[in-house]
C-alpha cells in the first residue's frame, strides 16, 4: 500500500516531545501536540488528585512546554512562523482527535506503566493502519504493545529520535514482535527522505545501538580518567575536534545533556546487561555518585564538570571534588597532527604517541574496538549500522570501525592485545579469509564486510546519494590546491572546495573559472558544492590582511576585482550554475550563493554577509546584489526607502540565518527560485538533478543588468542620519558608523541627485572602491587581525 503522512500526533510535550513536534512542523506537517493532564499522572502514582477546572487549565502544561521549547537556543524550529503548524491539547479532552492523524508518536515519561496506559487510550481512538511508535530510549519495545489489538501491534515499533531532534540525525527504528516489514521499510525511507535523518534499524536490546555504544564510551572514559590521572580538561582536549568529535568533547557534552540523563541510561545498562563482558564499566564511579548526590548535573543546575563564576570557567577536580581554575591541556602527540587536516588521517599518528596522550588513545581505542566487535550480532548484524549510529547520534566524524580501518585492522588487534583485549572471532575470521578492511570503495559506492556471507557487500541506501569522498579520485577532471572538479555524470560537473575551512582565495577563484570554462565547452551544467563541515566561512581574510598591511593596494584591488568578476561569471555563464550551501555559508560563501542560477540549500544552512565583523563591507558583489534585489522589489506608489532599508540592515547588522528557511526572510534566498532540502546527504544529487533540468529545458545565458534602480541622495541622507543617531546613542562605535556609511553609499548608488537606473558594473565599481578604502583604516586591520588570532569579531 502507498502510505502518506500528512498529519502527526505527538503525545508528551516535554523537551523531547516538543522538539519532535517542532521538527515535523519544520518539514511542513500539521502536528497535534498532546500531554497527560497532571492529575492523571498523580492518579497513576496513587497520589492525591489535582483539581483542574477547565480545558484551558488542562492545556497550560503543554502550552508552557512548547513555548519554552520555541524560546530555547538553539531553536528546535527552522522559522518561528512554522509554530503555527502545531496545535496543542491534552489526553483527557483531545485524544479522540488522533483518529484523523496518520502517525502517533508517544514521548511520555520513561515508565512502562504510564506508557501502557497511553497506548491503551491510543488503541481505543486510532483508526486501523495508523502508525504508532514510541520514542523510548531504553524500555524494551516488546513489553509496550502487550495486550494491544492485532492491528496496533502490526503498526507499532520504536522510533528513537536523539535530542535535540532537529540537529542530531540518528533515527533508530526498533521493531516489536509483530511489527510488519512494510512499516519498518516505510519508516526507514521516511526518516531519510523527509526527516533528514540517518535511519538505522536496531534490535530490541538495552539502549539499542547509539546509547549502548555511546554510554560505554563515556563510562569507559570515566574509569580511564581516574586510572591514568587525567584532568577533565585533558580528556576534553583529547576527545574533541582533534579526533573529529564535537567541540564539547566528553565532559562538556555530559554537562549539556545532563549527568542525570547519562546515569539513567548507564544504570539501565548495568541492570539490563548482566552478561555484557564490560558489565562492570557501567557501574558508576564514586565521583559520579557524589555529583548526583550534590545535584551537580551540569547546565540545568548551574554546575557539573564545569562551573561558571562571573566570566571565569572553573573545572572540577575529580580527586578532591572541588572546583578550581581551568588548566590548559597540551600534549606533544597532538602537536604532530597539526599539519594533518582530516581527523581520519590522524589516528595512525595518535596511537603511536610516546606521551600520556598516546597511552590514552591506545587504551581508549582498544577498549572501543573490542566492545563494538563483540556487539555483533547482539545489537545489530551489520557493522556499518554501529558507525552510522555514532556519527549521526553523537556527532562523531568517523565511526569505530572506520577508525579501526584508518589505524589498520591488524594494527588495531596488536593494540588490543597490548591492552589485554581481544576482538570477536568474526574479525579474526575476516582477516584469515584475506579481507584486510571493514570497508572498501568500488565504482563510487561504499561496501562493508558482511559477516554472514563473509564478503564485501554494498551499503544499502546509497543510490540517492552522491558521496564525493568515493568519486573524488576516479572522477576527478582537474584540481589545484583550492578545489577539485569532479564529473558527476550526465554532463554535470561539481566544483568542491578543498581549502582550509573552505575559505575562498586565489586558487578557489581560479578553480571556479576553470570549472565554468570546462562546463561551457564540454558539459551541460555545474554544481558548486562540497560535503565538508561547512560550505565556506568566506574569503581568505589572511590574504587581504597581508596585502593591506603591506599597502599593496593595486594587488588588493585586482584580487577583489577577480572575486567580483568570478561571481559575475557564476551569474552570467552560458550553463546553469547551482550552488549547494550548508552549515556556515558566510561572507564570500554567501556572495557565491547570491549569484547562483539556483540554490539547493541544506535546511541547516547558516547564511549571511558578515563582513562588518572584520571592518569591511561585502566586496565580492554582495553589497551590489542586495541593492539589486531591493530594486527588484520596488513597486509603484510603495515607499521604496523602506524596502532598501530592510536590505541595508541585513548587511549592516551582519544577520546570519539560523536555518535556510530564515534566509528567505533576509532576502538571501529567493522564493520561487531556490529550494531547501532536509537531508544534506542528498544535496549534491539534488543539485545535479536541478542542473540537468535547467539544461534540458534549454538554458539561456542571462543578459547583464543595466536597469538597477538606485535612490541616490534621497536614500543616502536617510542612512547617514540613522548612523549619526546610532552613534550618538552609543549603539555603534565611530568605526561602525564609518563602515555603515560606506555601505550606505554603495546601496544608494552614490550621491546621485535623483533616482537613476544604473548597471551592475557601476555598483561593483563603487563597492570595490568602498572596500579598498576601508582596508586602509587601522581599526579595520585591528578587526581582521583579531578575527585571525581569536576567531571572533572585535568591536573597536
Image: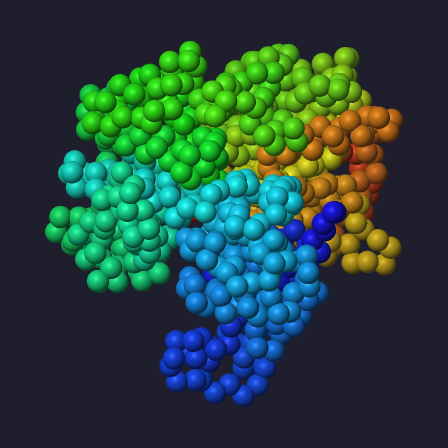
Locate residue 30: give its quadrant.
bottom right
Between 230 and 651, the residue placed more toward the observer is 230
Residue 224: x and y, percent? 21, 38
**Is residue 794 positioned above or below 303 on the image?**
above
**Is residue 50 positioned above or below 385 on the image?**
below
Q: Is residue 792 left or right of residue 36?
A: left
| Residue name at image x 86 percent, y 29 percent | 697
Is residue 792 in view?
A: no
Task: Count the numbered circles shown.
Answer: 0
| Residue name at image x 40 percent, y 33 percent | 376
Between 407 and 356, the residue placed more toward the observer is 407
**Is residue 380 positioned above or below 648 on the image?**
above
Residue 524: x and y, percent? 78, 20
Is residue 490 in view?
A: yes
Residue 255: x and y, percent? 33, 52
> Which residue lies most toward the left here?
320
| Residue name at image x 47 percent, y 31 percent | 382
Q: Is residue 26 left or right of residue 70?
A: right
| Residue name at image x 19 percent, y 25 percent | 355
Locate residue 610: give its quadrant.
top right
Between 710 and 612, the residue placed more toward the observer is 612
Locate residue 746: give its quadrant.
top right
Q: How is the image coloured?
A: rainbow
Amino acid at each position: 500500500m502507498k502510505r502518506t503522512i500528512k498529519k502527526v500526533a505527538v503525545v508528551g510535550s516535554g523537551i523531547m516531545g516538543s522538539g519532535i513536534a517542532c521538527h515535523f512542523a519544520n518539514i511542513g506537517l500539521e502536528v497535534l501536540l498532546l500531554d497527560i493532564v497532571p492529575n492523571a499522572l498523580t492518579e497513576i502514582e496513587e497520589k492525591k488528585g489535582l483539581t483542574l477546572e477547565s480545558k484551558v487549565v488542562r492545556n497550560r502544561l503543554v502550552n508552557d512546554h512548547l513555548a519554552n521549547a520555541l524560546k530555547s537556543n538553539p531553536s528546535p524550529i527552522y522559522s518561528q512562523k512554522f509554530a503555527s503548524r502545531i496545535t496543542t491539547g491534552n489526553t483527557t479532552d483531545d485524544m479522540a482527535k488522533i483518529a484523523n492523524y496518520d502517525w502517533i508518536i508517544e514521548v511520555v515519561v520513561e515508565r512502562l506503566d504510564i506508557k501502557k496506559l497511553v497506548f491503551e487510550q491510543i488503541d481505543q481512538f486510532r483508526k486501523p493502519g495508523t502508525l504508532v511508535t514510541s520514542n523510548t530510549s531504553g524500555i524494551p519495545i516488546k513489553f509496550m504493545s502487550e495486550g494491544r489489538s492485532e492491528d496496533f501491534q502490526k503498526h507499532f515499533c520504536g522510533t528513537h529520535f536523539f535530542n535535540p531532534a532537529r540537529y542530531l540525525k540518528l533515527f533508530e527504528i526498533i521493531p516489536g514482535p509483530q511489527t510488519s516489514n512494510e512499516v519498518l521499510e516505510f519508516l526507514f525511507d521516511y526518516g531519510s527522505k523527509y526527516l533528514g535523518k540517518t535511519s538505522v534499524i536496531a534490535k530490541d536490546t538495552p539502549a539499542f545501538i547509539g546509547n549502548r555504544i555511546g554510554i560505554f564510551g563515556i563510562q569507559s572514559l570515566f574509569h580511564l580518567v581516574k586510572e591514568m590521572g587525567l584532568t577533565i580538561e585533558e580528556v576534553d582536549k583529547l576527545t574533541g575536534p582533534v579526533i573529529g568529535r564535537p567541540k564539547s568533547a566528553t565532559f562538556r557534552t555530559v554537562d549539556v545533556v545532563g549527568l542525570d540523563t547519562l546515569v539513567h541510561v548507564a544504570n539501565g545498562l548495568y541492570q539490563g546487561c548482566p552478561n555484557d563482558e564490560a558489565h562492570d564499566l557501567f557501574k558508576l564511579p564514586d565521583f559520579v555518585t557524589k555529583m548526583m548526590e550534590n545535584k551537580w548535573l551540569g547546565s540545568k543546575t548551574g554546575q557539573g564538570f564545569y562551573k561558571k563564576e562571573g566570566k571565569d570557567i572553573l573545572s572540577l577536580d575529580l580527586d578532591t571534588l572541588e572546583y578550581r581554575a581551568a588548566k590548559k591541556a597540551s600534549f606533544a602527540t597532538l602537536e604532530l597532527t597539526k599539519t594533518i587536516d582530516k581527523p581520519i588521517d590522524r589516528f595512525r599518528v595518535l596511537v603511536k604517541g610516546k606521551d600520556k596522550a598516546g597511552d590514552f588513545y591506545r587504551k581508549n581505542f582498544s577498549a572501543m574496538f573490542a566492545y563494538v566487535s563483540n556487539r555483533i550480532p547482539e545489537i545489530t548484524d551489520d557493522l556499518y549500522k554501529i558507525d552510522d549510529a555514532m556519527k549521526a547520534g553523537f556527532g562523531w566524524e568517523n565511526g569505530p570501525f572506520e577508525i579501526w580501518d584508518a589505524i589498520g585492522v591488524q594494527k588495531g588487534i596488536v593494540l588490543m592485545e597490548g591492552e589485554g583485549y581481544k576482538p570477536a572471532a568474526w574479525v579474526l575470521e575476516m582477516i584469515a579469509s584475506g579481507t584486510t578492511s571493514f570497508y572498501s570503495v568500488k565504482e563510487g559506492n561504499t561496501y562493508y564486510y558482511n559477516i554472514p556471507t563473509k564478503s564485501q557487500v554494498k551499503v544499502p541506501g546509497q543510490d540517492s546519494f552522491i558521496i564525493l569522498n568515493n568519486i573524488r579520485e576516479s572522477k576527478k577532471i582537474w584540481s589545484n590546491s583550492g578545489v577539485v572538479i569532479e564529473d558527476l555524470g550526465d554532463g554535470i560537473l561539481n566544483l568542491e572546495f578543498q581549502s582550509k575551512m573552505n575559505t575562498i582565495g586565489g586558487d578557489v577563484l581560479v578553480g571556479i573559472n576553470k570549472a565554468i570554462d570546462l562546463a561551457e565547452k564540454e558539459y551541460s551544467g555545474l554544481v558548486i558544492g562540497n560535503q565538508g563541515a561547512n560550505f565556506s566561512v568566506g574569503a581568505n581574510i589572511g590574504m587581504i590582511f597581508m596585502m593591506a598591511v603591506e599597502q599593496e593596494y593595486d594587488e588588493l584591488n585586482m584580487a577583489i576585482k577577480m572575486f567580483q568578476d568570478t561571481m559575475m561569471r557564476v551569474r552570467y555563464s552560458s550553463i546553469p550554475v547551482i550552488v549547494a550551501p550548508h552549515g556556515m555559508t558566510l561572507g564570500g560563501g554567501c556572495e557565491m550563493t547570491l549569484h547562483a542560477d539556483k540554490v539547493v540549500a541544506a535546511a541547516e544552512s547558516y547564511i549571511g554577509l558578515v563582513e562588518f565583523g572584520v571592518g569591511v563591507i561585502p566586496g565580492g558583489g554582495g553589497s551590489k546584489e542586495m541593492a539589486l534585489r531591493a530594486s527588484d522589489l520596488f513597486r509603484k506608489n510603495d515607499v521604496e526607502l523602506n524596502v532598501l532599508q530592510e536590505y541595508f540592515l541585513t548587511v549592516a547588522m551582519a544577520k546570519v540565518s539560523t536555518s535556510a528557511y530564515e534566509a528567505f526572510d533576509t532576502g538571501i534566498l529567493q522564493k520561487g527560485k531556490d529550494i531547501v532540502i532536509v537531508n544534506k546527504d542528498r544535496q549534491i544529487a539534488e543539485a545535479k538533478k536541478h542542473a540537468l533540468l535547467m539544461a534540458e529545458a534549454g538554458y539561456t545565458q542571462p543578459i547583464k543588468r543595466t536597469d538597477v534602480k538606485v535612490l541616490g541622495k534621497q536614500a543616502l541622507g536617510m542612512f547617514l542620519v540613522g548612523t549619526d543617531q546610532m552613534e550618538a546613542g552609543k549603539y555603534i562605535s565611530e568605526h561602525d558608523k564609518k563602515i555603515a556609511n560606506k555601505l550606505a553609499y554603495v546601496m544608494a548608488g552614490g550621491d546621485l541627485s535623483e533616482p537613476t537606473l544604473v548597471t551592475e558594473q557601476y555598483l561593483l565599481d563603487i563597492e570595490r572602491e568602498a572596500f579598498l578604502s576601508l582596508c586602509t583604516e587601522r581599526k579595520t586591520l585591528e578587526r581582521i587581525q583579531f578575527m585571525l588570532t581569536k576567531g571572533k569579531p572585535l568591536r573597536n
